[in-house]
Image (spheres, rainbow, N blue to C red):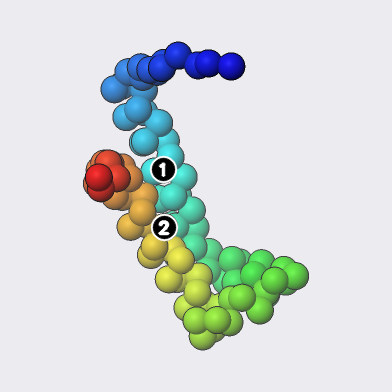
Amino acid sequence: MKFQDQTLEVSYKSVVILRIMLSLIFIIASTNHFLNTEKTVSRIENSSMGFIGNILGTPEIAVILSGIVMLIAGISLLLGLKRKWPQ
């Protein structure tokens, strides 16, 4: 079976909209980690893999650190930083 080279063209506007929507998921989730830390910690402690929350110290530290990472990822995705992989 032989396939022809096909290119898929996507409009720049749709890529920007998708990037904004995806970044908002990370930003909103990170604010939830900062504003509802105790609720997130209790969900971690009650899960079957709750011991993972103790890897970095206390579960509170893990929740705050993951919130920081998600916020940085969301903002960099929103701004379009590092959009292309290095060649």
Q: Is residue 48 visible?
A: yes
Is residue 58 or residue 42 the one in the foreground? Answer: 58
Which residue corresponds to mark 1? 24
Q: Secondary structure at mark 2?
A: helix
Q: Residue furthest front?
A: 1
Q: Quadrant of the N terminus?
A: top right
Position in image of residue 62 (x %, y %): 50, 74
Q: Secondary structure at mark 1?
A: helix
Disc 2 packing (10 Å; few <14; some 14–19; many ≥20): many
Position in image of residue 47 (x %, y %): 72, 68
Q: Which dot marks residue 40?
A: none
Q: Quadrant of the C terminus?
A: top left
Is residue 46 or residue 18 the one in the foreground? Answer: 18
The amino acid type of the residue labelled 2 equals Met
The amino acid type of the residue labelled 1 equals Leu
State the residue at coordinates (67%, 74%): 50
* Residue 4: quarter of image: top left
Q: Is residue 42 visible?
A: no
Disc with the residue nearer the chain's start (1 vs 2): 1
Position in image of residue 36 (x %, y %): 53, 64
* Residue 11: quarter of image: top left
Q: How many marks?
A: 2
Position in image of residue 82 (x %, y %): 25, 47
| On screen, residue 2 above or below 65 | above
Spatial CA distance of label 1 from label 2 is 10 Å
Q: Which dot marks residue 70?
A: 2
